[in-house]
Structure formats: C-alpha cells, structure tokens
Image: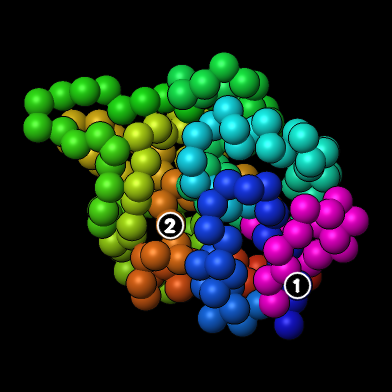
Amino acid sequence: MPVIAVVDYDMGNLHSACKGLENAGATPKITDSAAEIERADAVVLPGVGSFDPAVQHLRSRHLEQPIKDAIASGKPFLGICLGLQILFESSEEGKEPGLGIIPGKVRRFKSEPGLTIPHMGWNQLEFTQPNAPLWQNLEASPWVYFVHSYYVDPIDAGVRAATVTHGSQTVTAAIARDNLMAVQFHPEKSSTAGLQILSNFVALVKTPALT
C-alpha cells in the first residue's frame, strides 16, 4: 500500500483525513519530518483554522521547503481546506505571506442579503476540469461538505478544477495543476463522493506516471 505523508503542523484534526485515506486503500503517516515527507509516495496537507497561524506553524517547523520540494518532485500532492489556501500568495484573513506556490489571493465572501458566512454545509461542485483525475467515477455536480469564510482566487483561471456557488458568488472550490491538487471542501466529511475523491487520489499514487 502506498505511504501518504499527512503533514502535521497543529492545524486541525488529522484523524478524519487519515481515516478517509485508510478507507481509500492507503497507509497515512502523520508527520512533521522533512525526511518522511520526502520518502512518502504522496503528500496530503490538511488544515482548519486561520491563515496566519497556519503559515507560522509551517515555517516554525521548517516545512515550507519540504512541501515545495514534494510538489516539485512530481509526486501526488493534495491540499484540503486551509491546506488549499496556504498554497496561495496572501490572504485577506491575515498579514503573513502564503507559500506562493499558486499565484493569487485568498478572499473573503462578500456580504449580501440572506447570505450566511461561513459557507457551511453541503453544496454542489461544478467541474471546470471535468477530466481531472480527482473527479473520475463521480456523478456530474456531486454534493460535498464545506466550512469556510474565505475562498481562493487564482490569477490563472486554468488551474481551477471546480467551482461552487454560494448566494450570488461563484468561487473556486478546487484546483489542479499536474501533480498538485487541492480542494476547499472536506472530502473526509463528504460521504460517498468524498471517499471516491480520496480513492481517486490514492489510485494516482499507485500509478507510477501522472500522464
């Protein structure tokens, strides 16, 4: 079974992400070790909470470069929730610079009448990269589970793999570029569709070449 490093930087409950990966047929390994991240067959960067503490914790544990190296190496990489947002350059939530792996900014939902912020609960994905590996064997517009007040706004719209609409605002729900994938929703809380997404990620790990 492939070993997937689940990056531990004190930002969220890693147990549910690990359980989802186990159910999908992988061996998750919670770690903050650069060597273990390098050795792993794939990397998952989960996270819940606020942008500034997340990047501060990553940097204090000297994990920024290992994450960048893992992505550059070509191994499958999956960011989840806050693990998507910190891949960007900056956030309206805080002052710290993000990792800057994806050009763009994290923005707050604009207030509008009747709109609940955070965007919380089940909502439907609209695929903008319908052939992306994460979406294999899913029905069109699957329901997944969100909890967020901020969303990513990539400069290059081509990296956007799915969108979601909350009120009148349609925002990026997932990105995909080569071996790098990241989602705003919580696949580990998204029932059958979420398990399929994690299974698709694990299937990528078992496939030697991402072509």
Q: Is residue 118 visible?
A: yes
Q: Amino acid at mark 1?
A: Val
Instruction: State the quadrant of the C terminus.
Output: bottom right
The region drawn magenta spans 27-44
Q: Which residue is mark 2?
A: 186
Q: Quadrant of residue 88?
A: top right
Q: Could you say whether the residue bearing mark 2 is in a helix, strand or loop?
A: loop
Q: Which residue is mark 1?
A: 3
* Residue 67: mark: none
Tell me: 162 left or right of 142: right
Residue 89 to residue 1: above or below: above
Furthest toward the top, the residue is 95
Give whichever of discs 1 and 2 has the lower sequence position: 1
Q: Dot 2 surroundings within 10 Å: few (below 14), some, or many (20 or more)? A: many
Residue placed most toward the observer, 60 or 44 = 60
Residue placed most toward the observer, 186 or 153 = 186
Tell me: 159 left or right of 64: left
